[in-house]
Image: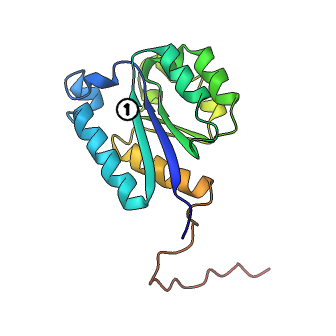
Amino acid sequence: MAETVRALILQGPNLNLLGSREPEIYGTLGARDLASLVREWSQELGVEATLVQTNSEGELLDLVQGAEGRFDFLVVNPGALTHTSLALRDALAGIPVPALEVHLSNIHAREEWRRQSWISPVCQGVLVGMGPLGYRLALEAGLVLVGGRNLGPPSGSNPSPVSSPSQ
């Protein structure tokens, strides 16, 4: 039996307000509904997921620093800390656990100050502007990163071989 893949999903400041805070930007899905979706997707993918939302930067740092040996990968939506927290950036850089950054909105299509992420350079991937689907895609990418799934064709499919151009 394969070893269980464990993911820590971290949600930063103000993500507890999803559904009511700027729904034209972040959508109408509430924080509890997003958590339910993430749990459902995790179970579907065979990932043991722990989801934590906190408005405290210090708590996020403690969670990141405590992830080594407990989790195989991280999914991080740092909220506004994306643009301000060198401490969170350094914590992610300081552990050997791969991390994926997720944002519900496309931070690159928003205000100039939101376009800078201190977190992205220390993550293995970034998913922005995909709404809640970004979390699903991050879970799938995390599985691939840690070897819990390969990128081969879906089972039962019979893809035609790709031919190289003649030289």
Q: Is residue 143 left or right of residue 135?
A: right
**Residue 60 makes an appearance in the image:** yes
**Residue sitting nearer the eye, 4 or 150:** 4
Does 110 appear above or below 143? above
- The quarter holding residue 146 reads bottom right
Left-right relation of 13 to 2: left
Residue in front for this viewpoint, 165 or 127 = 127
Q: Residue at x 63, y 41 (%)?
A: 69
Where does the image place residue 44, in percent across and percent down from the top left?
36, 60
Q: Is residue 17 above or below residue 71?
A: above
Report the amino acid beneath label 1.
Ser
Residue 116 visible = no
Quarter occupied by residue 162: bottom right
**Residue 40 image offset from top left, x and y in percent:** 31, 52
Expressed as whole percent of the image width and height from the top left, the position of residue 95 reads: 68, 33
Residue at image location 67% in from the left, 21% down from the top = 90
**Observer-nearest residue: 119 or 99?**
99
Which quarter of the picture shows residue 134? top left
- Mark 1 Cα-neighbour bin, 10 Å: few <14, some 14–19, many ≥20: some
Instruction: Where is residue 137? Give x, y as percent.
Output: 44, 51
Which quadrant of the figure contains the N terminus?
bottom right
3 displayed left or right of 23: right
Q: At x 53% / y 27%, what residue is drawn?
A: 63
Q: Is residue 48 above or below residue 115?
A: below
Label 1 sits on residue: 105
Image point 80% across, 79% down: which residue? 167
Up-down relation of residue 26 to residue 42 (above or below): above
Q: Residue furthest right?
A: 167
